[in-house]
Image (tube, helix red, strand yellow):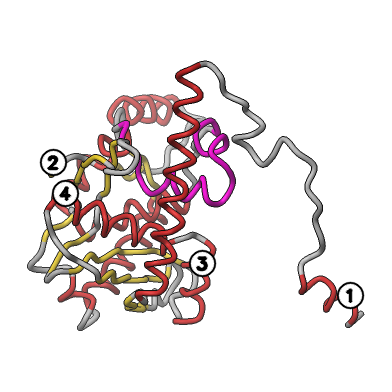
Amino acid sequence: MKQLLSNKDYHAHAAIGSTTLKAICKTSVLHAMERPFKQSDAMILGTAVHTAILEPETFGDEYLVSPKFDRRTKVGKEKHAEFQELSQGKTVINDEQMSVVESMKQSIMSHPIANTMITGGDAELSFFTTCPETGLELKCRPDYVKDGALIDLKTCQDASARGFAKSCADLMYHIQAAFYLDVYNLKNGATFNEFYFLAVESSAPHGIGIYKLETEAIEYGRIQYKEALRKLKEYLIAKELGEIDRHAFSYSNEIINIDLPAWAYNAQGQQ
């Protein structure tokens, strides 16, 4: 199904998303399913930028800018208490964060190509379907869908081609790309195969990079996410049967020989 959900409601939905699959690939099934999620300041900023650019009409419903209160005074304490009540259910950001959000939005909207890529299509729609191989319910929430392609807005420290390619590998964006394409296509009977990134730097001057992910990277992401789904299915079955070996679903319950990575030998030799 396609749904108009808030970002909060989407993430609260029990279906499996790319974040879980990336966590499985990066660590283990056990870590992905049992490690508490903690939202970082960078995540809060990134989500605020997404909302300001792609869903500006909902920004006031989801975010509230906190003024400064002198809580040493009675009036300051009272105003702070009033603000706390007003902010219930919203994400609170400060003036400095709001200024960064506005600057990043201005950079995106003033870019001659980036601006056109996020107009005339569909923003932040949620899609749910069932994996034909594992039977697990899957979900995806493309930032933007237009002209037979999925477009993802990413905040980053380095939007250069070299820097963002490194981020793609480190943060496993290729897994997200493959998963989103497959879930979207499966749900909609589509054959989309192009995935674009709009990368915007979180520090001034908020440089913009626009990138199309290579087919080879998407195919590699597809192999990885499908293997993660297989492991997750095994974990869920074992948990349901009460026969779960926690160590087997973590790193290993066996002794494994390891060696130093190749770069470590080179580094030692240069000292």
| Mark toward the start of the polypeptide (4 vs 3) | 3
Q: Residue at x 56, y 34 (%)?
A: 30
Residue sitting farthest toward the left: 120
- The secondary structure type at the circle numbered 3 is helix
Amino acid type of the residue that numbered disc 3 sits on in the rendered structure: Ala
- Residue 209 in percent (x, y) is at 36, 78
Residue sitting farthest toward the top: 242
| Mark toward the start of the polypeptide (1 vs 2) | 2
Amino acid type of the residue that numbered disc 2 sits on in the rendered structure: Met
In the image, is 166 to the left or to the right of 4? right
Answer few, some or many: residues within 10 Å of disc 3's Cα (few below 14, many 20 plus, some between 14 and 19): few
Marks 4 and 1, how far apart at CA: 52 Å
- Residue 162 in percent (x, y) is at 50, 81
What is the number of callouts on the image? 4
Q: Residue at x 38, y 67 (%)?
A: 219
Marks 4 and 3, how far apart at CA: 27 Å
**Residue position for label 1:** 268
**Residue position for label 4:** 187
Answer few, some or many: residues within 10 Å of disc 1's Cα (few below 14, many 20 plus, some between 14 and 19): few
Residue 150 within the magenta-colored segment of the rendering: no
| Mark toward the start of the polypeptide (3 vs 1) | 3
In the image, is 32 to the left or to the right of 87? right
Residue 18 within the magenta-colored segment of the rendering: yes
Q: Nearer the viewer, mark 1 or mark 2?
A: 2
- Start-end of magenta stretch: 14-35
Marks 1 and 2, how far apart at CA: 55 Å
Do callouts 4 and 2 mark residues in contact (Cβ within 8 Å)? Answer: yes
Q: Depth check: 81 or 16 in front? A: 16
Answer few, some or many: residues within 10 Å of disc 2's Cα (few below 14, many 20 plus, some between 14 and 19): few
Q: What numbered label is drawn on residue 1?
A: 2
Q: Depth check: 122 or 158 in front? A: 122
Amino acid type of the residue that numbered disc 1 sits on in the rendered structure: Gln
